[in-house]
Image: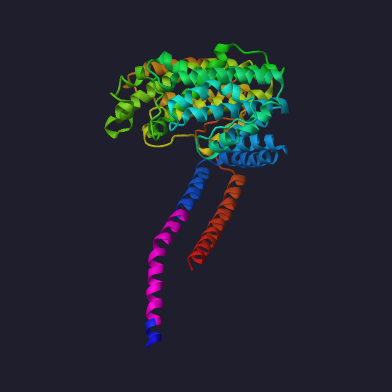
Amino acid sequence: MEGKKNNKKRKDNIRVELGFAFPLVMCERSKLSNHYQKKMGSLRAILSNPDDLYPLLKLKMAARHAEKQIPAEPHWGFCYTMLHKVSRSFALVIQQLDTDLRDAVCIFYLVLRALDTVEDDTSIATEVKVPILEAFHQHVYDREWHFSCGTKDYKVLMDEFQHLSTAFLELGRSYQEAIEDITMKMGAGMAKFICKEVETVGEYDEYCHYVAGLVGLGLSKLFHASGKEDLASNALSNSMGLFLQKTNIIRDYLEDINEIPKSRMFWPRQIWSKYVNKLEDLKYEENSVKAVQCLNDMVTNALTHAEDCLTYMAALRDPAIFRFCAIPQIMAIGTLALCYNNIQVFRGVVKMRRGLTARVIHETKTMSDVYGAFYDFCRMLKSKVDDNDPNARKTEDRLEAILKTCRDSGTLNERKSCIIRTKTRYNATSIVIIFIILAILLAYLTATRTYNMCKFLQNIE
């Protein structure tokens, strides 16, 4: 009798355990399914664009090589490790610079990302945030200073800021002065706009100058201090930063407007008020037509800086500095081409596929490549212009000016490759490599699924 009771109790316990385990098992299956779908999505992208395969492999190898080049000194090791975590693509491009300039650009980038982390953290009270922004250029000289804010890798950067200060103090004096000057001006500009909404297009340009145009000026100073480049004009340097920043502001609309606890609003009222009553109204489906028209207006505004960017890059002499500057600019014009007339900007994330990014990094070597990429993406963007769009004529005029600059360079026929292919190209080597990758991927997914399920079941025993 006692034995029957014990058996019944054991069965009841098993039912309870399975009852708790079932949702967990389903959750685990869901994670594996998402992982599988992500991998298959990457494979489909490669099959659709086989020319991406070799650049993707090169990019992967370059990333691993860059990660192995982390300096041994603790403070420099921290800086380069953080650089890889907050921007892998930037970390790859920066590796091509000579050591002194590479270190200076690395620190410059991280200092400004730290400053940006303070500005972006909407949980910091204004009366606390403003003094930090205004004094940030002084904190880089203080080996003891740190301030906890931000999330994930940015929180680590802020919590251990002393490593950044230590590395900064080892830079040459000319590099330090350039970084301090730009950090001071940027911090003051950010503080100015903390309690101020961007109203006019002029204020939009001013804000973008503070947070990005100054980066362009600072980099030009660092390039000049290295002895490798002439000092570029402030106007051209500013445009380099504004083109990138405006692209980011356009692309990141949904992320910024949904920021918790408080939305971040950078689109100028002078533009969006022509289409909706409130900036957040652009994300609602009933405003889709107006939202796309507003988006196209914003893209057209960003395109005003493209010709200055081409002029700036054409004057660069050092190949490494040229690639460092050119790759982000091509990514920007490509992103604008994707965003233009695209309602998905208000629904999710719009960005260039990874394979195309890899090809930009792999194939951008000369100014003819830059002219070619701008030419291709501007033609792509022009093909999307709707005659019924209220800014169609203005957009087409802007694009035609950029296309003319590219044609007048006389270098379009010199480029060795095209960023945008009109048709999918396969060759025997590509097919063999794709099948090998497919076999490895399927084996990996099968092994991963089996291992994870076994490990999970062991944990609930």
Q: Number of labelled discs?
A: 0
Q: Which residues are magenta?
A: 6-32
* Residue 28 magenta-highlighted: yes
Provide residue 254's location: percent of width, then percent of height.
39, 33
Does residue 207 appear to the left or right of 439 in the view shown? left
Q: Is residue 385 left or right of residue 211?
A: left
The residue that appears at 39% across and 26% down in the rendered structure is 265
Task: Report if residue 7 is visible in the image.
Answer: yes
Q: Main secondary structure of the magenta part?
A: helix
Magenta span contains residue 206 = no
Q: Position of residue 37 (x, y in %)?
A: 46, 50
* x and y, in percent, of residue 401 in the image: 48, 14
Nearer to me, 409 or 272: 272
User: Residue at position x 55%, y 60% from top?
Assistant: 447
Image quadrant of residue 347?
top left
Say whether residue 309 is visible: no
**Quadrant where the image shows the N terminus:** bottom left
Closer to us: 233 or 353? 233
Kindly indicate the quadrant of the structure image that contains residue 311: top right
**In the image, is residue 434 above or below residue 322?**
below
Snapshot colouring: rainbow
With respect to residue 166, does 312 lie above or below? above
Residue at x 58% of width, y 38% of height: 85
Residue 104 spot, x, y in % from top left = 67, 25
Depth check, front residue: 413 or 360: 360
Hey, which residue is sitting farthest left in the picture? 286
